[in-house]
Structures are given as structure tokens and as C-alpha cells.
């Protein structure tokens, strides 16, 4: 194992001694050790949260793709909006009886329970697929699944 | 804030509109049906002391507190959205589909659920 040779600073949350920071684009500023520790802690927590959100989204996308494969889905597109993400599922058929829509609503609830993401789900029947553009922004939309791909 | 009585009156008015529209304009009939369901649901929530001002608030409340209601409510809401926003009038559920799938199934499910909620609320009041 490689041993660490660089000198290490120890900054303690219990100390009120000053720490001098030199930042290229911010000049020089001073914080107490206690303030510096609190700021560093927030930074690490932010990084952890970012990683968690990334993992949640990756696992949700995987689950969504698997769900599409297991159901009569022609395509699935997600598109971010002002305050949520739109999930647009297009059926391979007319979904007579609405069983695909019911399954989609169940997946909606499952996603809500697992990750609390703000998602709006909409199912288009095969003959309604031309109307997709009314709900998504092609510039930001991402195709998660296509049956014919 | 609307009272339960006002929500019920609105629900009945929208249902009446549905009956007038369903044969000739099934797309707009589905819109009337959704809004009838929305007021039915809000009438029940009023009994819980809850008032939702926006669709988003209502959706969140249903998902958090009344999950069994989500499936039928979500279907009614989606059909109503498509009826209004699909480009080129592409809404493809006909009069029969709207009546059989939306009113007889989903709207009734909402109704049944809400009846249960209101009966529960009445029971609590009597106690």
C-alpha cells in the first residue's frame, strides 16, 4: 500500500482558530476552523446527495426500460419540464380495456414510493402516437425505449 | 374554498355535461367526466379537512394518502389531457370506449372509493 507523504492539515470543528484561504478567483479570505469544517461538511453532503440522485435516476431508467420490454410498449420518451419530468409511453396497440394504462399507473406509484421523483406519466394509444409533440420538447426529450430499435 | 355541497353540485353538473356530449363529442365528454371525478374526490377530501388548489397538490395527496384511488383517477385525468392537447384531434377513444372504460369502470371506481371514505367520515362524526 502506498504511504501518504504530503503534509496533511487538520482542521477541527471545535476550534475557533482562523484558517486563511487563497482562491484564484475570489481573493483571500479567512474563516474559523469551525466555519471551515461546517462548509466542508456541506460540500461532502452535497456530493453524496448528488451521487445518490444519480444512482436513483439510473436505477429508475433501468426499471422503466425493463417494464417497457415486459409490456406492449412501442416507445418510451422522457422529457424534463418546468417542475417535473414527463414520461410518455406509446402503446403498440389501442390498449382496449386499459390494462396497459393500469400497469403504468402502478409503476408510477412504485416510482413515487421508491424515489419520490416528480414524474407525470401519459399513455398514448398507437393511433394517437402522432400527437406526441404536444407533450414533449424534442430538444430535451430522451428516448428510453423503442421496440423497433 | 368550495364546500362539500358545492363540490357535489359541480360534480353533478359535469356529469350532466358528459351525458350531453358523450355520443357526438367523446373527447370533450371525457374532459367533463374527469372534472366530475375531480369534484367527487375533492368532496371526500373536504370531509378530511383537506383542500387541494392545484392538480399537482391533488395528485401528490392521492399518491401519498389514497393510493387505491390513483389508478382510476390517473386514467380519467390522462384521457382528459389527451382530449384537450393531442395535436390534430388525435384522441382515439370512441363514444363506446369512453362510456364503457371511463364512465362505467374508472368513474365508478372513483365513486365507490369515495363512498367508502365518506361513509367512514360519517361514522367518525356519529362516534
Image: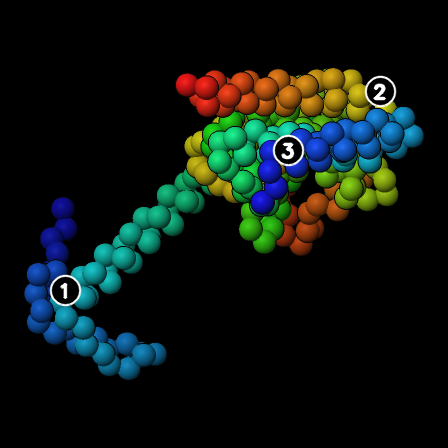
What numbered label is drawn on residue B5?
A: 3
| Comes first in the chain, label 3 or label 2 | 3
The x and y percentages for residue B73 are 63, 29
Q: Residue at x 23, y 56 (%)?
A: A41
Instruction: Say yes or no: labels 2 and 1 on the same chain.
Output: no
- Mark 1: which secondary structure? helix
Q: For mark 2, does the 10 Å Cα neighbourhood hold few (<14), some (14 to 19), or many (20 or more) residues?
A: few
Chain of the residue displaying label 3: B
Q: Nearer the viewer, mark 2 or mark 1?
A: 2
Same-subunit check for callouts 1 and 3 = no
The residue depicted at 21 percent of the width and 60 percent of the height is A38
Q: Mark 2 sits on what residue?
A: B96
State the residue in front, A122 or A146.
A122
Q: Nearer the viewer, residue A74 or A124?
A: A124
Q: Which residue is mark 1?
A: A34
Residue at the extreme right: B24
Q: In the image, is residue A38 above or below residue A94?
A: below
- At x 41%, y 40%, the residue is A55
Amino acid at each position: 500500500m502506498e504511504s501518504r507523504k504530503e503534509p496533511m492539515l487538520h482542521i477541527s470543528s471545535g476550534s475557533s482558530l482562523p484558517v486563511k484561504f487563497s482562491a484564484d478567483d475570489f481573493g483571500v479570505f479567512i474563516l474559523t476552523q469551525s466555519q471551515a469544517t461546517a462548509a466542508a461538511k456541506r460540500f461532502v453532503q452535497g456530493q453524496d446527495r448528488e451521487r445518490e440522485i444519480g444512482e436513483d435516476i439510473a436505477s429508475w431508467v433501468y426499471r422503466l426500460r425493463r417494464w417497457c420490454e415486459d409490456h406492449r410498449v412501442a416507445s418510451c420518451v422522457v422529457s424534463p419540464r418546468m417542475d417535473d419530468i414527463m414520461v410518455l409511453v406509446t402503446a403498440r396497440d389501442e390498449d382496449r380495456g386499459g390494462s396497459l394504462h393500469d400497469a403504468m399507473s402502478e409503476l408510477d406509484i412504485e416510482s413515487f414510493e421508491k424515489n419520490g421523483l416528480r414524474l407525470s406519466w401519459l399513455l398514448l394509444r398507437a393511433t394517437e402516437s402522432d400527437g406526441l409533440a404536444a407533450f414533449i420538447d424534442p430538444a430535451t426529450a430522451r428516448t428510453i425505449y423503442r421496440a423497433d430499435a | 374554498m368550495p364546500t362539500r355541497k358545492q363540490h357535489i353540485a359541480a360534480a353533478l353538473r359535469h356529469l350532466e355535461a358528459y351525458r350531453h356530449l358523450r355520443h357526438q363529442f367523446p373527447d370533450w365528454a371525457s374532459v367533463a367526466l374527469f372534472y366530475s371525478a375531480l369534484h367527487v374526490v375533492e368532496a371526500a377530501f373536504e370531509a378530511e379537512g383537506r383542500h387541494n388548489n392545484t392538480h399537482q397538490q391533488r395528485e401528490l395527496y392521492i399518491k401519498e394518502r389514497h393510493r387505491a384511488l390513483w389508478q382510476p383517477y390517473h386514467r380519467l385525468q390522462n384521457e382528459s389531457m389527451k382530449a384537450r392537447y393531442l395535436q390534430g384531434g388525435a384522441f382515439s377513444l370512441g363514444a363506446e370506449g369512453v362510456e364503457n372504460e371511463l364512465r362505467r369502470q374508472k368513474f365508478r371506481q372513483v365513486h365507490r372509493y369515495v363512498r367508502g371514505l365518506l361513509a367512514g367520515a360519517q361514522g367518525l362524526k356519529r362516534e
